[in-house]
Amino acid sequence: QVQLVESGGGLVQAGGSLRLSCAASGSIFSINTMGWYRQAPGKQRELVAEISSSGSTNYVDSVKGRFTISRDNAKNTVYLQMNSLKPEDTDVYYCKAPRVLSRNGYCDYWGQGTQVTVSS
């Protein structure tokens, strides 16, 4: 069974920084893209940033220049460094690893979510 475990959320003042981590564990053969999504109550979950196994990245426009996604392939871990945080960044942040190859074949996996709250 593959699990994604997130950490690093919390409460921070506007302009501050947080670093999220997401570690994948289990009988993993390969992981390609890993990404971070966020979701506010009553809204659709949206992609924040994603990174391929080769290091190619993609960001939603609202976080470009403020957030940086990175990964450690040896540890199956993805990070999201969030700087210059704004109140509108307040959301539950979810880690996703689509099409992970494990003993179960190809499956999509989500983390449990971590709350990020930015106060003004």
Image (spheres, rainbow, N blue to C red):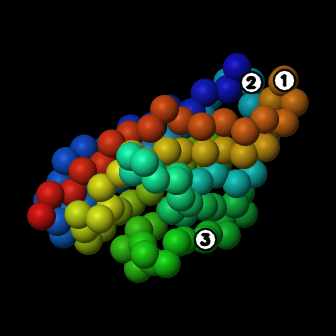
Query: Residue at the spot x=41%, y=68% of the render?
Result: 67
Query: Residue at the spot x=81%, y=29% of the render?
Result: 102
Query: Of label 2 and label 3, which has the lower sequence position?
Result: 2
Question: Which residue type carries mark 3?
Answer: Asn
Q: What quarter of the picture does the C terminus occupy? A: bottom left
Q: Are marks 1 and 3 in contact (CB under 8 Å)?
A: no
Query: Of label 1 and label 3, which has the lower sequence position?
Result: 3
Most distant residue in the top direction: 1
Question: Which residue type carries mark 2?
Answer: Ser
The residue that mark 2 highlights is 27
Q: Left or right: where does residue 66 sit relative to residue 38?
A: left
Mark-to-mark CA distance, 2 and 3 = 27 Å
Query: Residue at the spot x=53%, y=35% of the render?
Result: 111
Count of numbered labels shown in the rendering: 3
Q: Position of residue 69 (x, y in %)?
A: 50, 62
Query: Of label 1 and label 2, which has the lower sequence position?
Result: 2
The residue that mark 1 highlights is 103
Query: Residue at the spot x=25%, y=44% of the render?
Result: 10
Q: Nearer the viewer, mark 2 or mark 3?
A: 3
Q: Is residue 115 above or below residue 81?
A: above
Q: Nearer the viewer, residue 74 or 83?
A: 83
Q: Left or right: where does residue 66 sit relative to residue 37?
A: left
Q: Residues within 10 Å of mark 3 (few under 14, many from 20)?
A: some
| Quadrant of residue 68 within the rendered picture | bottom left
Q: Are marks 1 and 2 in contact (CB under 8 Å)?
A: yes
User: Disc 3 on helix, strand or loop?
Assistant: strand
User: Disc 1 on helix, strand or loop?
Assistant: loop
